[in-house]
Amino acid sequence: MKQYTLNVNSAVKPLEKYWELCVGSCHATTALREDYRKQLEQCQREIGFRYVRFHGLFDDDMSVLVQDSFSKDVRVSFTNIDSIFDFLLSINMKPFVELGFMPDCLKSKPATIFHYKGNTAPPADHDQWAWFIRKFVRHLLDRYGRTEVRQWFFEVWNEPNLGGPDSPDGFFAGSMEDYFKLYRVTAEAVKAEDPCLRVGGPATSNNAWIPEMVKFCRENQVPIDFISTHHYPTDVVLGYGVEDSANFGRPTPEQLEDPEYMKTYREKMEAFHAHLWERVDRGVVTRMTQKAFQEADGIPLYYTEWNSLAGLPSDGPFGASFIAKTVLDGVGMAKGYSYWTFSDIFEENGMPSAEFHGGFGLLTLHGVPKATYRAFQLLHTLGDFLYEQKLADGTLDVYAVKHVPAGALQFLVVNHHSLLHSIAEEEVQITLKDLEVPVNTVLKAQVERIDDNHANAIACWRELGSPEYVTKAQLEALKSASGMERELLEISVEQKEASVTVKVPAMGLALLTVYLL
């Protein structure tokens, strides 16, 4: 049994819920759907997300900038954007505005990504792009007012380090220098309309280009109000210069036509992915954040995408414990996190069909809360002060929080490890010292759990036979299985001291709340 002893008068620090700043979603046009809007409103109400970020604001399916096929005249319409932004404000949210992708009539070459064909090329004419950005920002200021829009964020593009001038896929069909040029033109266009608007980047994958971005902006007097980047725990293995990574050995067009080569290639990739998590260290995302925080060199740091990226395990307790450990270990570094994404209403590779399929969302296609959703709900209930003293022993972490308005102490007990690593049930005795309560007091307490048997709808889905399409009855059963339960406890106090024991299964978490009043 592990031991955690806390003097209730020991040092605390402010606990800012930076993980609630923003949440990601599928591309912009999905925000016009009724089911998307209902799910986002639920997330805001129950979790407290304040901003939402998505790709494709300027994609052709948004009809923002359309060129007449005969006259070649360009027509601008912000009608669909207005509908989305109006809705966000109506539910007490704001847009974290990702400026992209490229309208078809402004692109420099053919290059697209995803099922919805977002154009990823730099502009053919940067002056035209600047004109368009200024027109867009001016429209926002006119419609919503400077006081409102100055609270928003303007982020230039998405993951420009994935792709390249000659790449057949990726998010940006240009080089780092091409991105820096695009950033400069875009940032200056935004600031030309209002110098107080917040603009930043480079919005890279895998914490890339941060020192280069800082240096470029400072040496060239380019405005930058925040650094944004992305990370996933598998980045260190999947990406970008690691031997035998998935980015090595991409088949050539000729190899794609060779059945024997492709059979060997698929076998190699399947073996690679089957053992991927063996090479993912526990807590790697926190170390990524520490490095990026240093490289940002005083410029506020925002992670505009993050997730466990673990497939089906991310829909269950593993994903929930990953979230809890990641956000509490990262306190004091990033100014904001944006979990990718709030819903499985997500069609980068076409709309999915199975209710549970390892999608990015906190909610399933039909709004079943996953274990990850429940983790954010528990985190939302935490108080405003985090005790500096924590327990970190093997796979177990205990975080203590003071909730002043409730007159309570909270202990989030997390038993987490990377997939394919050894982990077992853990038991911890939590001892409180120096309690200022009357003699023979019995404290009221409660425990809320997320594990294989609690708040875990995917287990119910498997018991139902893993149906691809769920019936109404099955949907209700899944929602019921996802619910949180409270176990009520009583804890005796002797000599200003009290103890309670909590068991947490592998990959589980438990929130113990002890009321002192």
Image: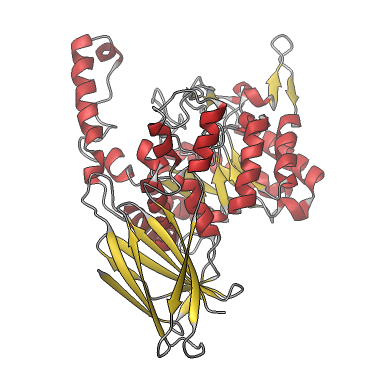
Q: Which of the image's four quarters has the N terminus? A: bottom left
- In the rendered picture of this protein, how many numbered marks are placed on residues? 0
On the question of residue 203 being in view, the answer is yes
Q: Nearer the viewer, residue 447 or 351?
A: 447
Q: Nearer the viewer, residue 301 or 49?
A: 49
Give the residue at x 44% y 43%: 204
Give the residue at x 44% y 32%: 356
Where is residue 77 drawn, in percent x and y? Answer: 75, 28
| Side of 485 where 240 appears, left or right | left
**Is 381 placed above or below 29 here?**
below
Q: Quadrant of residue 134?
A: top right
**Is 290 placed above or below 51 here?**
below
Q: Which of the image's four quarters has the C terminus? A: bottom right
Where is residue 11 drawn, in percent x and y? Answer: 45, 81
Q: Quadrant of residue 58?
A: top right
Q: Quadrant of residue 84?
A: top right
Give the residue at x 50% y 37%: 478
Where is residue 425 drawn, in percent x and y? Answer: 27, 56
On the question of residue 335 being in view, the answer is no
| Side of 377 where 234 appears, left or right | left
| Side of 421 where 214 appears, left or right | right
